[in-house]
Amino acid sequence: MITPKLLVVGELNVDLLLNKIQAFPQIGKETIADEMNVCLGSSSAIMAANSAAMGVDTTFCGVVGDDYFGDFILGELGRKSVSCRHVTRIPGQKTGCTLILNYGQDRANVTYQGAMNALTANHLPFEMLADYQHLHVSSLFLQNGLLNDIEQILINARAAGMTTSLDLQWDPTEQWAFDYARCLPYVDVFMPNESELLALTKTNSISGGIEKIRPYLNTLALKMGRKGSFGVSGGEQLTVPAFEVPNFVDAIGAGDSFNAGFIQKYISGAPLEECLREGNLMGALNTTAAGGTGAFCDFNKISENIKDFWGIELSLS
């Protein structure tokens, strides 16, 4: 059996996590956090790292600065068995960083974009796209160069015979300048959460948002947090409930881990319900350890924890 190859294109940054914060910060005042972690961040990198931990042959395409954070990211991706052959270091640029303040199951984020904003289609290995089965792109609104080139990237991926998935993530400017009518026909799996779908379509109901994008949609994998996920593909639509989490730590990267689980099943040819269920399972597992990759050491540990928590036997296929 040939192992499917995944190419992830997107942002790279470190996450600085503060937990057990005594109060919300106020200007002119100082507050204390009782826990701190520094870990691999960014939607794209978390999805790539966790896909590789699940046994998917994964390569990353992105940019980092020529600095300590860049060293840290490349080291973490390498440790997770993600190929960095298409990651470019940009002299004079600083690598991005996100400061995350966790409050129970909610959080506040502040992101310094740094080098991630320099990523464009010119960094992609277009001559090698046919070597990969699937392209995943994330966080367009943090990467203006990528946002400007996304339609052409998707068209080229399709021409190379790849399937594609897209997770826009939240737009910090709240302009939502993504032409879904032009781009979604080239996206095999569109992976927003509820808030992102409503903001993108400028509607006030999930059903209304889906109707807005339906003429351009192939498959929708809608993330709904504690409610699970909702899928639409052709005439099929279904809701798959979430898994109860026995020992919640934080939700950082849960949506990205959903993406990893869904795509791992999707590229193996599984039906929509199975893809959604695997996405929900990996999203739930994500929340049992700190940060986006803490629960995804390797396949054996993932399998062991899933069996302990939910009594499910995991397979590589």
Image (cartoon, rainbow, N blue to C red):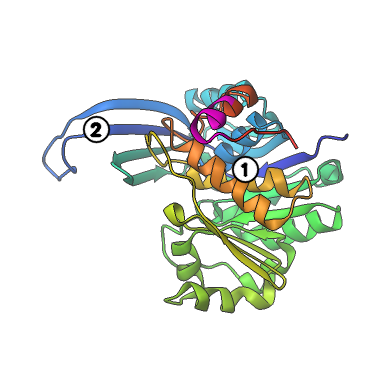
Element at label 1: helix
Residue 249 belongs to the span the image colors magenta: no
Mark 1 or mark 2: whose residue is earlier in sequence: 2
Residue type of the residue flagged with mark 2: Lys
Q: Residues within 10 Å of mark 1 (few under 14, many from 20)?
A: many
User: Which dot marks residue 20?
Assistant: 2
Predominant secondary structure, magenta span: helix
In the image, residue 306 lies in the stretch drawn in magenta: yes
The magenta-colored residue range is 304-311
Residue 107 horizontal/vertical position (percent): 32, 45
Most foreground residue, 295 or 276: 276
Is residue 283 visible from the viewing direction of this image?
yes
Instruction: Say which residue appears at 33% left-offset and 45% top-offset.
Output: 105
Which quadrant would the N terminus be assigned to in this image? top right
**What residue do we see at 49% from left, 41% from top?**
284
Asked if one can make out residue 119 in the rendered structure from this viewpoint, the answer is: no
Instruction: Provide residue 51's location: percent of width, then percent of height.
Output: 65, 36
| Residue ID for mark 1 | 260
Q: In which quarter of the image is residue 244?
A: top left
Examine the rendered structure and indicate whether residue 225 appears above or below residue 199.
Answer: above
Query: Residue 192's quadrant in the figure?
Result: bottom right
